[in-house]
Amino acid sequence: MKGTCIRVRTPLSLEDARDIVADFVNRYNTRRLHSAIGYITPKDKLQGRAETILAGRDAKLAAAGEARKARRKAS
C-alpha cells in the first residue's frame, strides 16, 4: 500500500490520508483484477458474478478459436 498509494500521493493531513486510503481500497476491491480469484474483482466475487464472468470469457475464447480456425481454413 505504501508504494502504490501513500508515497505516490503524499497526504498533507490525517483527513487527506484517510481519503487517499479510502480511494485505494475502493479501487483495489472494485476495479483491480485479482489472480488468486480468477482475475475478477473481489466485489464481483462477493456479489456472485464470478461464474457469469468466467463463462463469458470461455465463450469469447471459444468464438475466437473458431474464427481462427475459419481464417486458417480459408487461407
Image (cartoon, rainbow, N blue to C red):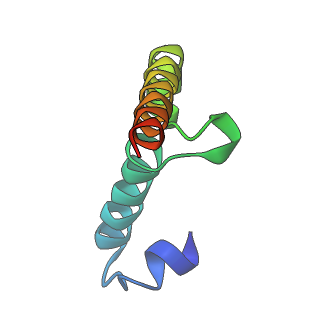
Residue ID at (56%, 41%): 39
Residue 50 coordinates in the image, percent (x, y): 52, 21
Relative to residue 1, is residue 67 depicted above or below? Answer: above
Q: Quadrant of the N terminus?
A: bottom right
In the image shown, does 72 or 43 lie closer to the viewer?
72
Task: Where is residue 22? Give x, y as percent.
Answer: 37, 54
Decide: is 33 above or below 70.
below
- Say left or right for 36 vs 32: right
Q: Quadrant of residue 74?
A: top left
| Residue at image location 29% in from the left, 71% down from the top | 16
Q: Quadrant of residue 14?
A: bottom left
List the single residue furthest toward the right. Answer: 36
Q: Residue at point 35% right, 81% down? A: 11
Q: How many marks?
A: 0
Q: Among all residues in the image, which is located at the extreme front? A: 75
Tell me the residue at 47%/85% (across/down).
Answer: 7
- 65 relative to 13 in the view: left or right: right
Task: Name above or below for residue 33 compared with residue 37.
Answer: below
Location of residue 54 in the rendering, given as x and y in whole percent from the top left corner: 52, 24
Whole-percent x, y for residue 67 in the image: 40, 33
Residue 30, image quadrant:
top left
**Which is nearer the eye, 60 or 20?**
60
Residue sitting nearer the eye, 23 or 52: 52
> Relative to residue 72, is residue 70 depicted above or below?
above
